[in-house]
């Protein structure tokens, strides 16, 4: 029963972590390319125009990211639940998996910026250039979630099957 409570707590923490990451990372992406938010993100998430721009960005970031926490953590922690019998080891491995996913997402956003820097032509209008930078960063964060899932699963597998 304690391990099940541990899993539920970890899923809640993963959801909170992905939500906070979405809010903060969206502020950075907005600073790089506000036109991406004006032309795509605010409309996609139906964010009212009369709100403060930073509140709008925060709400959009939250809506874009909160669901990644449960989507990625539930399979990882179910595997952890099946493989790790010790509650403390399960909790520790869960924290490491969340931290690893956070780091991979952060790296993904930075990679998106560097990728855009490498491929977006310099002769574009600043608004178009910012849009392409921001959309590349936005997309890279989602791809980093796809990368973090097998990495976190591997971490749980290693913790559940320690080398003797």
Image: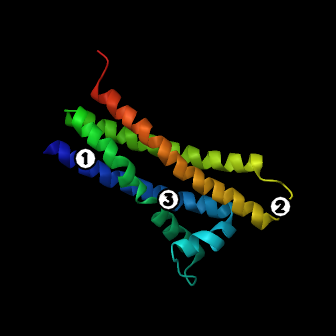
Left or right position of 25 against 7: right
Vertical placement of 55 versus 29: above or below? Answer: below
**Residue topped by disc 1:** 7
Label 1's element?
helix
Label 2's element?
loop
Tell me the crowding category of disc 1: few under 14, some 14 to 19, or many 20 or more residues within 10 angstroms, Cα based: many
Vertical placement of 164 versus 75: above or below? Answer: above
Q: Determine the residue positioned at 38% across, 32% down.
A: 155
The quadrant of the picture occupied by the C terminus is top left
**Residue topped by disc 3:** 22
Q: Determine the residue positioned at 84% across, 54% down.
A: 122
The quadrant of the picture occupied by the N terminus is top left
The x and y percentages for residue 70 are 35, 54
Residue 124 marker:
2
Camera-side residue of 116 and 34: 116
Residue furthest bottom in the image: 50
Camera-side residue of 89 and 149: 149
């Amino acid at each position: 029963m304690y391990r099940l409570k541990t899993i539920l707590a970890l899923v809640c923490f993963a959801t909170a972590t992905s939500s906070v990451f979405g809010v903060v990372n969206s502020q950075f992406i907005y600073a790089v390319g506000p036109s991406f938010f004006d032309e795509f993100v605010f409309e996609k998430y139906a964010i009212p125009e009369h709100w403060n721009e930073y509140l709008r960005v925060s709400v959009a970031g939250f809506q874009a990211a909160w669901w990644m926490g449960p989507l990625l953590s539930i399979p990882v922690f179910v595997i952890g639940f099946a493989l790790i019998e010790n509650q403390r080891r399960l909790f520790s491995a869960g924290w490491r998996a969340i931290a690893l996913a956070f780091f991979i997402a952060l790296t993904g956003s930075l990679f998106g910026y560097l990728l855009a820097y490498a491929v977006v032509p310099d002769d574009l209008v600043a608004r178009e250039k910012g849009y392409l930078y921001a959309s590349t960063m936005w997309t890279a964060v989602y791809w980093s979630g796809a990368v973090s899932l097998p990495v976190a699963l591997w971490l749980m597998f290693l913790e559940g099957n320690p080398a003797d």
